[in-house]
Every structure is written in C-alpha cells, then in structure tokens.
Image: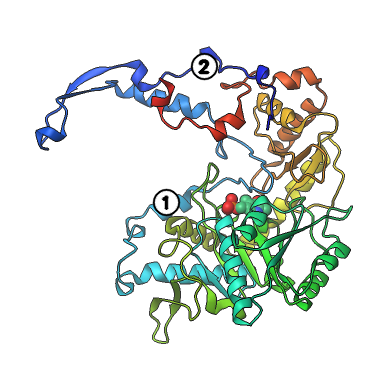
Amino acid sequence: MEYYDQARYQPADADNYEPLLSEKDQTSVDVDSPLPDDLTRDDVTLPSLEEPELARHYVRLSQQNYGVDSGPYPLGSCTMKYNPRFTEDVAAVDDASVHPDRSGDSVQGTLQLQYDLQDYLGRIGGMDAVTLQPPAGAAGEFAGILLAEAYHEANGEGHRDEVVVPDAAHGTNFASAALGGYDVVEIPSGDDGRVDIDALEAALGENTAALMLTNPNTLGLFERNIEQISEMVHDAGGLLYYDGANLNALLGRARPGDMGFDIMHFNVHKTFATPHGGGGPGAGPVGVTEDLAEFLPDPHVRKTESGQYERYTPERSVGKVHGFEGNWLVLVKAFAYIDRLGDDGLSDASAKAVLNANYLAEQVEYDVPLGPFHHEFVASAGDQDAADVAKRMLDYGVHPPTTKWPELVDEALMTEPTEVETKSNLDDLADAFNAVAGEDDETLANAPTRTTARLIDQTTAARNPRLSWHDLD
Ligand SMILES: *Cc1c(COP(=O)(O)O)cnc(C)c1O
C-alpha cells in the first residue's frame, strides 16, 4: 500500500546532520584483557572524544527530538501527559530493584505495594479483583479475553465464539479477540458517533462471548446508553469488557464497574504516569468482578489473616500472561502517582482533562462535527489531507494530533491535550491548528520544512527499520 508519493520524500537537512560518534573520531585503543587470548582482540577502534564533545553530541540529538517534556503532545487516545519526576525517583530507590525469584517472606514491602495497587485500581475502576501482570493495554485485552473464555467454559457455555466490537474501537480490540480465537463481529456506530443500539441488538445472540467497549469512546463521546447496553449484553449471556485507555476522562468521577462492566484493563502508562511511545514499557492491569476473580493470572497477591502478603495461584487461573508479577517498576510509578494525587487529585485531573479538550475544541477553526466531548475531540481537516496537516503542524513547533482515525470523521484530527496544559499552551496549539487550516495544498504537501528530518517515508521506516548504525554503511 502506498501512503505517500515517493517523489515527495525529502532528505534530512544537511546542516542539521549530527555525525555519529564513530564518524567524529576513530582511535585505535590497545586492549589489555584478563580473558584468554583466543577470546580477545589485540586492539579495537573506538571514538576518543573529550567529555564536552560527548555531552554536546547527546544534547544536540535530544534537541532534534520532541517529547512530553518539550511541549503539548495531543495524540488522541494515547494520553501523552507530562510524567512528574517524583514517580521516577520512587521507582529508582535501591529497594525497588528486587529479584523476582526472591521468597515472599523476604520481599513483604514489594508484595504490599502490589496488593495496595491492586486495591487502588479496584476502587478506581469499581472492580473486585485486579491482576497487575499484563505488560500493556493490548496485553490486558488479551488477558481479559482469556478470562472471558475461561468463565464461559466453566459455565458450560464454551460454544460462545463471538466478540462484538464497535467500528470506532482501537485496532487492538479486534486483534485481541481474534488472537483469543474469537470471531469478531464489527458493529457500525450511529450518526451521533455512539453505539448503534439496533446494530448491537442484531449482533448479540447465544454465541456472544463479550462486547468490548471504550467509554468515552475514541471520538471522546460518552456512551449515554451504557446501562441499556450493559443490560442487553448480559441478557444475551455475554460479558462486558471495558477498554480503559480513556479512563483519564472519568478518573475519580465514574467507574466502569458501576456501569456494568465485568472486565477492564487500565493503561497505567497513559492514565497514571510513565513515559510511553515507541512500544513501551507500560503495564495493563486487568480488573474483574467477583465472578471472574478465580480465573486471574498466576501469581496473584493476597493478604493473609495474620497480615502477611503472599503470592498464590488463583483456583482456576488462566496461567501466566507475562513473567512474574508484570512490569514492576512501571507499576511502582503508577502506585506513586495515585498515592500522591489521592481522590481529590484524581478527580481534579479528569475535570481538567475534559475542560482542556472542550476549550481547545472551541478554539480550533476546523469543523468539529460531534460532541459534547470528554477528554478528547475529533476535528475534521475537511478538504485538506489530515496527514499533511500533521506534518505542517510540526513547522509551528507543536506535536500534531492523531490523524485519520477514527474513520467515522473524514480526515480526522483526534486531539487530546490532557489535563497538564495551561491556557496559554492550549492557545498556542489552537494557533498552530488555525494557521495550517488557512494554508494551501502545496504548502502542506511540502511540509515539514523547519524540522531536522523533512518528509520521511514513514511506512518504509516502520516496516524496514535500520536498527543499527552498521546498516548505514
Ligand atoms: C492505547 C490504546 C490501546 C492499547 O494500549 P497499549 O497500552 O498501547 O497496548 C487500546 N485501546 C485504546 C482506545 C487505546 O488508546
């Protein structure tokens, strides 16, 4: 599939090229090694640079990059918010690095933190039990699908082989259900961007294992009929799965468990601190109602009557979905974040996330067809190509929104400013949107012009990455 016209690609600006260390210097270094001669070389060629040169090399590289520490990063659905440093400090204390094979008796503090985080997440989501093991949101979805399967199997309902997914859902929902061996039944959204109740009714039946739903959905819209949807799914004998990627919108205000969801995942790297992007690391704890707790992955952490914390295998566990108790240090950061913010801080975060999204939606001149929004909104680039709009926004020094998804909105610009941005940051972001909205196709097609790397072939970069500088030879 061709996403871009090959002729449009532009090379990196030569003035901005930062040489590799090996291009700056090649010095032959004698090696005096205690290892046997047949395992060592007599000399190696290494760059030999003074400390300032080395420091400046890395600082220059970092300045060519853009991240949540540089400015707003309004990538809708990803919740790219600033990650406070104290969570890094907490995860970096010496005692946090414990070997995962140590006996439970010798790591009581570690197990207590896991137990308390299970408890925090359970209370935030309105769930009875939580596993911390899955290493990402998508992995949480897959674990949730395994739990649904085990539950139906145990109830003599193993014939249920369909998972219903609305068309606005994240691609991982379809993939997780399919990977779990289910037939995916996709249902269209209504004109208002929400679940089409008639389409849902038609899709549900005796083969329904679950409905996977994101609420607010990926258009930033709250599913107002959630109680009716929950009743319909349960009446059909299915389970209701909550994709927690958008939990930032509801934090401390509404709980999936109270809406009728049976299983949910938390993207703790989106909602509760941890820099993410580029594939991780993250964590995707999964919460369930009491009926599903006995199937949770192995091990799980509980508190005994004598006040000890211990790992155990739930009675009918689906087994392991990751090593040990998951991505431990990411979980430490999530714990630190929740503990520091507390109930008031969490509900304040969601209020500001929603306020910021709605303020920005009002400021942008692009058409915003739906609403009212929660933590994100979807504008339409109209006659412009959303991908070109995104590239051009880079020239204004901001990170663009998610583009061309959900497909329900033409040339979608799916925007999530998050709670951390100030009014003046939001105004700058709106200025960038509005400047691009007034530009012609040619300007857009040649953008970006002010960045280190120009219009790159991102499809080839993703499919055929050069992961070592050796590949550049
Ligand atoms: C990010 C996201 C996921 C997948 O989560 P990962 O942690 O990236 O695996 C699933 N659903 C939605 C709506 C998302 O935004």
Q: Amino acid at mark 2?
A: Asn
Q: Is residue 315 left or right of residue 233?
A: left
Q: Which residue is mark 1?
A: 89
Q: Is residue 409 left or right of residue 10?
A: right
Residue 471, image x, y percentages: 42, 25
Label 1, residues with CA under 10 Å away: few <14, some 14-19, many ≥20: few
Compared with 257, 374 (above or below) is above
Residue 435, image x, y percentages: 78, 26
Label 2, residues with CA under 10 Å away: few <14, some 14-19, many ≥20: few
Q: Which residue is mark 2?
A: 16
Mark 1 → mark 2, Cα distance in angstroms:
34 Å
Q: In the image, what residue occupies the spot 70% across and 18% down?
A: 446
* Of the image marks 1 and 2, the number of the one nearer the N terminus: 2
Viewer can see residue 66: no
Q: 372 and 391: which one is in front?
A: 391
Q: Amino acid at mark 1?
A: Asp
Q: Quadrant of residue 76?
A: top right
Q: Is residue 469 left or right of residue 242?
A: left
